[in-house]
Amino acid sequence: MIPKSIALEASNGGGGIVTGSAISEVLEEVTSSQLASLNDTDGFVTAWQDVLQEAKDSGSNKIRWGGRGQGGRGRARRTFQPHDVVVDNISLVYAGSTMAASKVLLEDAQLKLLSPAPLRDSKDVAEPSIYALVGRNGSGKSTLLKRMHDGSIAGFPPHISTLYLPQELVVDDDITAVEYLRAQIGEQTIVNRKTMKHTIQTLEDAMEALDLTQPEDQEEMERLNDRIASCEEELEMQVQEQSQMDGRISEALEFMGVLPNYAHHLDSPLSTLSPGIRKKVILASALLCPSDLLLLDEPTSHLDMIGLIRLRRLLLEQTVTETRATTVLLVSHDLDLVNQVATHIVELRDQRLFFYKGNYAIFTKQKRQESLHQIRHDLAVVKKKTAILDSMQHLKEQNPSRRKGGVKKKQRQIDSQKRKLERLDQQEKTNNVLPGASTLSTTNPIKKTQELLQKADQGATSDLAPDKKVQFNFRNPKSEWGQPLILAYEVGFAPDVDVLAKDGDEQYQQQSIEVKPFEITKKPGFLFDLVELCVDEGSRYCILGANGSGKSLFLRLLTKQEKPTEGEIQHATNVDIALIHQELADGMVEAGLRDGAIDAISFLSLLYPNKTEQELRGELSNFGIGPSQATTNLRFLSGGERARLSFAANMLRDPQVLLLDNPTLNLDAESVEALVYGLSHWKGTLVFISHDTHFIRALDPTCYILMEQEGKLRRVDGSVDTYLRSFASLKRL
């Protein structure tokens, strides 16, 4: 086994350095001994030979091997492959309209994304390499992905091709799904050709530097020739794939579940499709546009359960094939997805990137252990400070000795205790307080913290309150009705005929007229019909269903924002119902900007002119918006921060019923856990739409499915896991 750092020096009698032919013998001896245990499939061999060649060319009598940036197994004990992304000293700044609005996101950070490592058996396909980027809202996750794709990060490898799939797609109003995918293929082909030509040029430059009189260089020449031939074959393959574009597009859309179910939507503008179908079209481009690095920003947003299953298949089965290996960097709040596919976690915290091996569950376990360790440390500090203060108080109350110098001795003892107290205070300032340590700031910190540690020892870590910076603190309703708060009687909804024609649903309407015997169907032209729901006070309900089945519309009907085509919606007298979803949050902010609002405080002041600034700040704090965020320009708030502002604006009304449409959409993973904690402790009534199985499972609601083909609302006999198991009975998706 080769040591981390080797310096070859041989003593010659009086301790001089051997030069000339003697060093060659030493090199050959070390080479043979070190390479004996390595086989030809290990890239470690080539790296070591390169180091030997460099020492030989320079005439140096020392060989430096390993260590940071020195090749070999210096980092993560593996040789860097051509498609690894390793960039040091990254600085990333979000530039606002003013200097005060600008924000430093990364400073002297290191980015390290290792490509899928090939297995020893060349017949097998490499294991996927999937990195999940986590961090709080506003920390810069999406900005980092965009800058990587734009190539605006200094030192980013120019030969790495990237494909960036944003959370929300901004396209021309008239472009269809097929036209969008064709454009994506064309753009990515240009990028791939550019990076491939750069790779070929680099290999050709390396060939020109070889000395073909040396056996080692002759072998290196063969290896470089093979790599150049492989690159040229890939370029030719891309040209062939261009000629088969339409067939490949159909296969990709079928893989993501768009075809054949939504074939009638393919000729419609992409902007008119439901968010879930639009997301499936976006993800289909990952199958059509091969790249070295796939950047996914919230790929699960708006996806139904079938879409989530197909996304997992895409990441686990399609990113590494026999011809290409793609590294994945994704930002996602879906903890089930991250736990199932992630091989590494990258945490963006304190303007740095921290890397952890394993999935999110392993990551959180390690972080929780660190947090509990911090709490135990802080508890010990509190006990020491309490003992010091008691000792100082005892010394002050104690009469000084009548002997000579008794008063001075007493003062020296008090000063000594003060210095100890100052040292402890300084240690607290220098220590990085982790989430959970804030529990010490209570009226009785020692007792509260001991109870907290006892819960942790018993495994009840789910009862730990979230950090105040990410909390969702809901005030409980002040009134009780003792009756159902919302009743839906035989509700049905049919879009306008013009809308049906525009969306291509006339064809679907004609197809749905043909009813098979004993088959339950909806009325022609209806999204759903005969839907009934009783929302009891203090209960929780989750509406599940496929993309395009009308779930979001059904929530709007429950609020009476829209009228049903048939049936009736009834509310309890004077009940207050709040509907919250991301589009409404964005719309509220844009409306506030038009009305003259600058920041969160002025925005809430427009909505609630009778509330004091202190009351508004308190409500913002309840939903994790601190003093600095409260005065940040509304235009520069992240999606998650806008969602929090929407919660604060609605909860100032003290509603008794919350209707939430994909509430985790723009939240980071830590905020999702905080939202679960807040809603679990809220005594109001909750109806929500979500496909985040971790979020649904944690709230344990009564689940209903809005059946797309039947157009009926069916209750799930069991939890969301019962719904998930229903897909196992189907053929492999």
Image (cartoon, rainbow, N blue to C red):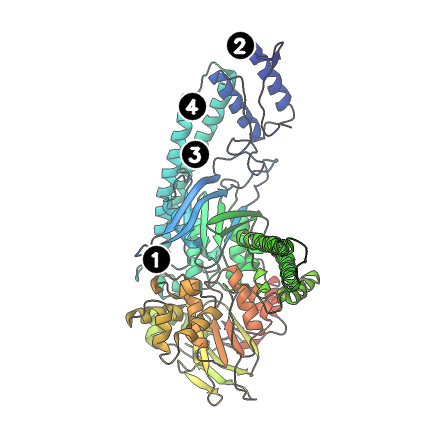
Q: Which residue is mark 3?
A: 231
Q: Residues within 10 Å of mark 2 (few under 14, many from 20)?
A: few
Residue 485 % position (x, y):
51, 85
User: What kind of element bears circle 3?
Assistant: helix
User: What kind of element bears circle 1?
Assistant: loop
Q: Residues within 10 Å of mark 1 (few under 14, many from 20)?
A: few
Q: Earlier in the sequence, mark 2 or mark 1?
A: 2
The kind of residue tagged 2 is Gly
Q: Residue at x 57, y 29 (%)?
A: 44
- Mark 3, mark 4: which one is toward the viewer? 4
The kind of residue tagged 3 is Cys
Q: Earlier in the sequence, mark 4 or mark 2?
A: 2
Query: Gap between marks 4 and 2, in whole Å?
Result: 28 Å
- Nearest the eye: 721 or 61: 61
- Mark 2, mark 1: which one is toward the viewer? 1
User: What kind of element bears circle 2?
Assistant: loop
Res 268 seen here: no
- Relative to 654, residue 501 above or below: above
- Relative to 85, residue 274 above or below: below
- Asked whether the beta carbons under mark 1 and mark 3 sit within 8 Å of each other, the answer is no
Query: Gap between marks 4 and 1, in whole Å?
Result: 50 Å
What numbered label is drawn on residue 101? 1
Q: Is residue 448 left or right of residue 229?
A: right
- Relative to 134, residue 501 above or below: below
- Asked whether the beta carbons under mark 4 and mark 1 sit within 8 Å of each other, the answer is no
Q: Is residue 572 left or right of residue 587?
A: right
